[in-house]
Amino acid sequence: MGAQQLTRTFVVWDYLVFAGMLSISAAIGVYYAFCRGGQTQKDFLMGGRKMTALPVALSLTSSFMSAITILGIPSEIYRFGAIFSMYGFSYIIMVVITSEVFLPVFYKLGITSTYEYLELRFNKRIRLCGTALFILQTVLYMGVVIYAPALAMNQATGLNLWGTIITTGVICTFYSSMGGFKAVVWIHVFQVGIKMAGFFSVIIQGTVVQGGISNILNDSYHGGRLNFWDFNPNPLQRYTFWTIIIGGSITWLTVFGISPAQVQRYNACKSRFHAKMSLYINLIGCWGILACTTLCGLVLYSRYHECDPWTSKKVSAPDQLMPYLALDILQDFPGLPGLFVACIYSATLSTVSASVNALAAVTISDLIKPHFPSLSEKTLSQLCKVTSMLYGALCIGMAALASLMGALLQVVLSIFGIIGGPLLGLFSLGILVPFANSMGALVGLTTGFAISLWVGIGAQLYPPLPERNLPLSLITDGCNVTSFHHQRNWNATTGTPFSPNAFQVHSAERTPLMDNWYSLSFLYFSTVGMLVTLLVGIIVSLLTGGRKQSIDDRFLLTKEDFLSNFDFFKKEKLVLNQTLYVIENDGTKMTDFNQAINQPTQSV
């Protein structure tokens, strides 16, 4: 079936549904800011550490389900096939390693920002390096997250592009800075429902329009989209089983294992058991989202397998295919296109709000409190709100830079890989290598970041050739000529924003460096950064006397951390007592910290 002609955009019901979602989100922020009494800095950043597993799991799932996920994954499956669904295995690896390696150490230390750990384990300079890289990564990421759905909605509905970007940024910043951590978590819980409703409206109607799931699978099979298994070990190929399992797992570990935005949430649980449960419940949510996005990608292909809207210039970028599909198949149901827009914007709001809250937490705990230890709780709480507002404004500005970069999902995973990979290597060095010292950590981090930045920038300037990416064929034979001219307005607003990227060098002659090193699958950027940081860190630590230092076991992963899974009920009280004491002493006052750990130990 060819692409259908779009005869309408938004009507009143669509605007009402969309506005209702924004209003409820803002109302939750107001409720937590004004109706629940004053919040201390601890309440603002960690919800008073009384959260249970389910809302935290839904919050983790909600921010995982960003607009990049909703717009990017279906378009990747449309272009490269359902092999992307192999991420289901990556999520298992990511959750198990996070809950058994990183969570035990961070939870027993009771820290607000993961970068506090770097000072406890190494020194203040390493902590500042980690904080600076995290802030850079998150601000770049949020620029893409705000820009991408605004562009897609501008193309699909005619809403003003920069007006939409600014509105999105202002609302996110408002409820993050007013309501704090609890507002962010409960808004995420509300928005999970909106996002699932938007997804299901497209999946159900798409299945009905295409004549059932068997037709969709049949079209996908004949179009080569059901390519689940590709065991080619070549690291230069964009998607294979190995790039997704190895590269994908490490890339998502940089998000769930060490990112303050995620660690802040499971550290807010009232016990370590609840913290671990939140991750495992979140795994089920991640699988559900992956299944929905995969099915959306197959519906996209089945709908447009004879007339591709991208190559026939009906949309200017693959990331606009999902809103194009939604307006195509939902146009006879007033309110449902609005629900899908609300779904995309819920995704943007939940991701940006979590990131703004985490940036505020990191800035206060890593940059302000160490230099101004005498600040009162009230002053710190006000500073949290001001910092949230400043980061919100900065991210709106970064959306302008995002407009110059490549395809959505690739840009985001590249950012996570280039910056997150070396950071993951740094934390792994601290937690898993007892003899790692601050010199090894600094040299390892610097080298790992330099190498991953080199390959990342090279790939932007000299993108891999099509035989490396292996995009599947897209056909325009079934396009209706009249419809083609009618649809040209989709491409008229902003030119070609994402394909190719604005930094690409076109005239250069291809060299072996470009065809090999710069053609590395973007999913391996994080693996390169992590491995280089770990290896260099270990070698330098050994050469600079790392074996002579004595490191407190609290900063390392010990066998007791693992064995405690099997005698949870016996030790729960002990762990809780330690943790709450540490939090009240900011996690960095070493004298109090030692007392807090040692006292319960002596009484056992």
Image (cartoon, rainbow, N blue to C red):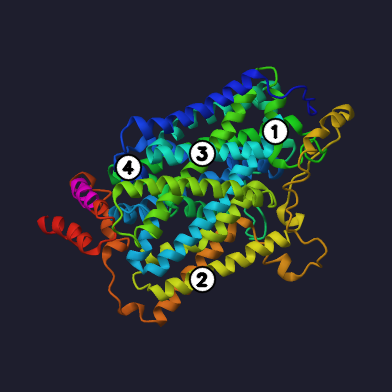
In primary-sequence order, the first of circles 4 and 3 is 4
Amino acid at dot 4: Asp
Residue 88 seen in this snapshot: yes
Percent from the top left, x then y, of residue 358? 44, 49
Q: Main secondary structure of the magenta part?
A: helix
Residue 230 seen in this snapshot: no
285, 452: nearer the viewer:
452
Label 2: state its secondary structure. helix
Q: Quadrant of residue 513?
A: bottom right
Percent from the top left, x then y, of residue 351? 51, 42
Q: CA distance from mark 2 to mark 1?
A: 43 Å
Amino acid at dot 2: Thr
In primary-sequence order, the first of circles 1 and 4 is 4
Amino acid at dot 3: Cys
226 displayed left or right of 588: right
- Disc 3: which residue: 172
Q: Categorize mark 2 by other alpha carbons within 10 Å: few (<14), some (14-19), many (20+).
A: some
Q: Are marks 1 and 3 in contact (CB under 8 Å)?
A: no
Of badges 1 and 4, the one in the foreground is 4
210, 98: nearer the viewer:
98
Amino acid at dot 1: Leu
Q: CA distance from mark 4 to mark 3?
A: 19 Å
Q: Quadrant of the C terminus?
A: bottom left
Label 3: state its secondary structure. helix
* Residue appearing at x 75%, y 59% in the figure: 504
Label 1: state its secondary structure. helix
- Disc 4: which residue: 43
Q: What span is in magenta? A: 571-581
Of badges 2 and 4, the one in the foreground is 4
- Disc 2: which residue: 446
In primary-sequence order, the first of circles 3 and 2 is 3
Can you tell which mark lies on residue 300? 1
